[in-house]
Amino acid sequence: MKKFLDQDFLLSTDTAVKLYENAIVGLPIFDFHCHLNPQEVWENKPYENITQLWLGGDHYKWRTMRIHGIGERFITGDASDWDKFAAWAETVPHLVGNPLYHWTHMELKMFFGIEKQLNPETAREIFDECNEKLKKPDFRPRAFIERSNVKFIGTTDDPVSTLEFHQLLKNDDSFKTIIAPTFRPDGALFIERPTFKSWIEKLAEVSGINTDSLDGFLNALKQRVDFFHENGGRASDHDIQKMEYVETTKQEIETIFHKRLSGGELTDEELKAYRAFLLTELGKMYAEKQWVMQLHMGALRNNNTKMKNLIGPDTGFDSVGEFNFAEGLSRFLDALNQADALPRTVLFNLNQKDNVVLAGMMGNFYDEGVPGKIQFGSGWWFLDHIDGMERQMKDLANVGMLSHFIGMLTDSRSFLSYARHDYFRRIVCNLLGVWVENGLVPADMAILENMVKNIGYYNAERYFLER
């Protein structure tokens, strides 16, 4: 019987162990999509305790605590940090089979050297030990990043951001990791939100361009794309719940735009037309800059209206949607391709039924000399577990090309989440190792080790940074 989280964790064959030891140990991390706060990195924020570092903003953990019956006071409420940690410790033993059980113990081991299982009996000891270590300088954000050997971090940023802390970090010679902004224009795309009018006023303020007209609005967005590019931005990201594409005209969108500014309520068809038009215009801007466009598709957002009104959106009440977006995605990509303005694009799904849809869609669009221009992104959110990641890679291999895959991202707000990259890399090694042991792949270790290194780091580095 193997020991939990031993050195061969998730590696079930000799080939998998060799691949991990020869190709993964020492390999840096390219984290192209996350939600870390660059201000916390710049200030090298000290954390008073493990609760603030570990549980604050982590809706993965919040969600499972609610499923376990923990009261909201101990999740996002006014309970003490110790009581919140104790509530998490009470939840963890019930998470066997959930990746959070693995991640929790991997993070304790990797960053704090703690190999005890977290439960109500060990909670106080682990809480105190972590807190004592957090008093030291090498238990702050920069040290966590450096210890994890992270070479690149792509944050998620509002177009109206000043990028102040990205600029400060870029000019700080003592910190070597690249922290690049990622253009996330939710404020522009979700025209129906109550905050839209105030958001475009802020856009006008930061860009210096009047946004009262559609042309002004588009020019202001273009100015922000230019600004992000000047400050190291090389990618955009989009929350696309339903990928619907309708052909429209600029004149029709101008009418919709002014209808919204004058306080009118838009129909579903008008919203579809507006989003299709704006996303296409943005795609053209990204292609001009040779950016990567990321499409995170299929989330069913804010299902619990009562809790959204009580504690706000994006607090753990989202789930997997069931949308058919094959045709809409095809028409959208094709429209950009016909205009010679299709950027490198990463397609993420949240429902496993869409795996082959996206893996197959990749092959429809290409550029000569650009390996894997359209990417099927790694298992994301509700799919970043062992089965989800294996299934994603098998489907990609079956109908596409696994060797050009750009690998894992953390999609996290925690500086401890780099353990997830090790989790993913072990799964990659094990998948290939099993194929070798079963005679499905030749035991050519030079080819396989190179493939693992590329999936683990180099494909992403080339994809996002080389032109």
Image (cartoon, rainbow, N blue to C red):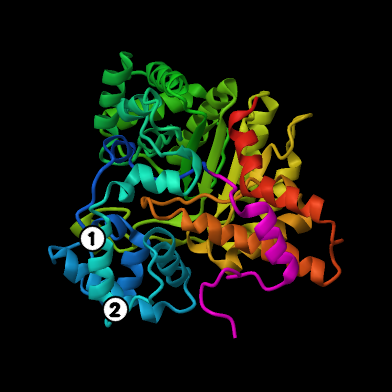
Q: Is residue 340 above or below residue 210?
A: below
Residue 426 appears in the picture as rendered: yes
**Residue 232 on the magenta segment:** no
Residue 73 appears in the picture as rendered: no
- Asked which quadrant contains residue 36, the reply is top left
Mark drawn on residue 122? 2
**Residue 23 on the magenta segment:** yes
* Residue 441, horizontal then vertical, whole percent: 84, 62
At x 58% / y 70%, what residue is drawn? Answer: 9
Apparent side of residue 75 relative to residue 245 in the rendered image (left or right): left
* Residue 351, horizontal then vertical, whole percent: 55, 61
Apparent side of residue 11 relative to residue 349 in the rendered image (left or right): right
Q: Is residue 458 above or below residue 96?
A: above
Q: Earlier in the sequence, mark 2 or mark 1?
A: 2
- Residue type (three-letter) at the residue carrying disc 1: Glu
Which secondary structure lies at badge 1? helix
Apparent side of residue 211 relative to residue 71 in the rendered image (left or right): right
The crowding category of the residue bearing disc 1, from other C-alpha atoms within 10 Å (few below 14, some 14 to 19, many at least 20), is: some
* Residue 76, horizontal then vertical, whole percent: 21, 62
The crowding category of the residue bearing disc 2, from other C-alpha atoms within 10 Å (few below 14, some 14 to 19, many at least 20), is: few
- Residue type (three-letter) at the residue carrying disc 2: Thr
Which quarter of the rendered picture does the N terminus lie within? bottom right
> In the image shown, does 259 or 174 lie closer to the viewer?
174
Q: In 3D space, how far apart are the residues under numbered discs 2 and 1 (Cα atoms)?
A: 16 Å
- Number of numbered discs on residues: 2
Which quarter of the rendered picture does the C terminus lie within? top right
User: Farthest residue in the bottom direction?
Assistant: 1
Reading the image, the residue beneath label 1 is 132
Looking at the rendering, the stretch of residues picked out in magenta corresponds to 1-29
